[in-house]
Amino acid sequence: MGGINTVELTIVVVLFLLVTVLGFLASRWRRADNLMHLDEWGLGGRSFGSWITWFLLGGDLYTAYTFVAVPALMFGAGAAGFFAVPYTIVIYPLVFLVVARLWSVSHVRGFVTPADFVRSRFDSPTMALLVAITGIVATMPYIALQLVGIEAILKAMGVNGDLPLIIAFVILAIYTYNSGLRAPALIAVVKDALIYLTIIVAVIVIPSKLGGWGAIFGAAEEKFSAGAGVILPATGQLGYATLALGSALALFLYPHSITGVLAASNRDVLKRNMSALPIYSLALGFIALLGFMAIAAGVTPIGTDGNTIVPVLFQQMFPSWFTGVAFAAIGIGALVPAAIMSIAAANLFTRNIYKEYLKKDATPQQEAKVAKIASLVVKLGAVLAILGLNPQFSIDLQLIGGVIILQTMPSVALGLYTRWLHRGGLIAGWFAGMATGILLVYNIPKLNPDGTVAREHFGGSAFALSKFGFDTKLAVYAGLIALLVNLVVTLAVTAVLRAMRVPDGVDGTAESDYTAEREDPTVRDLPDPLESVPPGLEGGARAGR
Amino acid sequence: MSSASRPPGDTATAGVAPQRSDRSPWNWLLLVGIVLPLLVPIYNRIEPTLFGWPFFYWFQLVLVAVGVLTTSLVYRATRRGSADRQAARDAVARDQER
């Protein structure tokens, strides 16, 4: 590599400084008169319109890690890596109706987190705590992985050492602390402009330099000729479809997605976004193919880090100044989701652990204060995880993250439609699904290209059905199997508890909450759960008032 | 902001809130965008290619458009009247002025 590329580095630093200024200015944007309220700091005042929501959710769901890891997967595994496209197609029709219901009930009742909803709906602080812990545990490695994206571009620029990474994250931590969700919302606009610019230039310039798309797919075909070439082997199709479906089911259960949803100003904004967000999926399709372009260009990753193939490809194809722009796009693309994720995790900690168990009479000011500090702790944890632990550990955890967050589906998503599920059933189902999921992923080996075992555990998320005794080479996404176990246990235990007439608590929500619109008298402009305890909660843990 | 918030106890609950429904036959159209991308065998092939792209790749990008089309249709067909939507926007504007 030979030293640091100064042109690239200068452009990255300048663009990084620009978004830093934006991040600090964001606190004045749409003048919140009092940021010391979780609705302001943690949900941007619940006021984002269609455009801002589009940028925010886009920055939230399509992360830098995706931009780096999906092409790396295509580079290493071929067609299977393209699952990201059906995954991000399926998701929007799937959640189209669901997110609108979640938005409505959350606005009527002042919920800030999915665990708030579960607590009130099923009258179960325990299930809420499980949802909160699941969310935090699933989010932490996701934040750490955003750093992997930044690391990849730093490596490509020849910058060594941990200091630049620490500086980037410290600055991110300070402006998130200062401006809350408004910071990533504003920065997401810059991030997307850079990302789209990079992709459009990449799909025009790179194929013409490599001799056209035919040559690109030809090179990939040759590389994977031992298998099924550039399409899936017959046995890989079920795994492809279940991974796409399972990942789609999981995505909007992640706390950071829900934070983005709740920050929207009304139901229309969300529904319109569900049809506009797939534009990112189109971009993702082209980004995935950067992996094949890297094959055609004969890119070799730096060291053993497969995640560096896209940065290296850019360096080979673009002049230094444009490579700098592209690198800045990836780097800033890491900051946006990292900020939203840390805010989401902080909201969960504050609302469902601190306020529920540590300080029941916390004022809104104290809540906001705790959330801001929690967001710092979360980011510090992510930096320490990347510096102190093997990055592989974060990747393993993130793999498990998708599997475990799926286990909150019955309470968070089905709960929006039915109250029939019993809190005891949900808790039992969560434990069953969690145990199954972790056991399955633990038992998936990572194979070398020649079929020998590279690692015995946490080698992927596709579970071979032959291990259950089926005579087949098919594999299924482990998260879906775990969810199935979860659902069966939830339903069975619910049926038993209902038959035994075990009390199922008081539903803190009303049927009409789920379709409430912004102009309804029930929808609060700035809900304050402390000032107005929702009906049905009076008997709960907040009874002290 | 605190002076403007509603009194404790919040009298505006179930009785006052309008009963709406998010059910509609149009919602079934959403299934197209969910089921089609999961039917991998129908598109797991090379031919016909388009601009050098194997079918597997270009067809899935076409499916993105199918997803956009169906969700947009459902949104258009089920959205509320313009007066209602204006009321929602007014509510947002009103809250921001506080």
Image (cartoon, coloured by chain):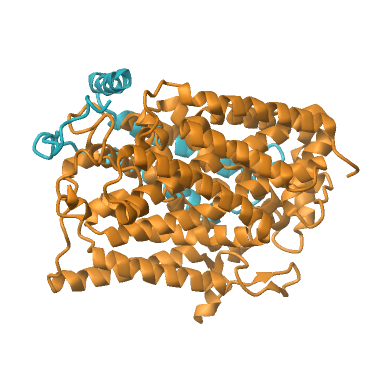
Q: Is residue A338 above or below residue A304?
A: above
* Figure disc tally: 0
- For residue A431, side relative to residue A532 (left or right): right
Name the residue at the bottom extreme.
A469
- For residue A454, side relative to residue B8 (left or right): right
| Image spot of residue A471 (x, y percent) | 54, 79
Query: Nearest the camera: A210 or A361?
Result: A361
Residue drawn where x is 56% and y is 36% of the image = A174
Residue A418 can be seen, yes or no? no
| Image spot of residue A545 (x, y percent) | 17, 47
Query: Nearest the camera: B8 or B35?
Result: B8
Q: Is residue A49 above or below residue A285?
A: above
Quadrant of residue A196 in the image? Answer: top right
Name the residue at the right extreme.
A2
Which image quadrant: the N terminus of chain A? top right
Residue drawn where x is 46% and y is 22% of the image = A29
Q: Is residue A196 above or below residue A116?
A: above
| Image spot of residue A540 (x, y percent) | 19, 55
- For residue B12, side relative to residue A415 (left or right): left
Q: Is residue A245 above or below residue A280?
A: below
Q: Colour of chain A?
A: orange
Residue A16 can be seen, yes or no? yes
Query: Nearest the camera: A411 or A133?
Result: A133
| Image spot of residue A382 (x, y percent) | 58, 51
Query: Nearest the camera: A344 or A203?
Result: A344
Q: Colour of chain B?
A: cyan
Residue drawn where x is 61% and y is 58% of the image = A394
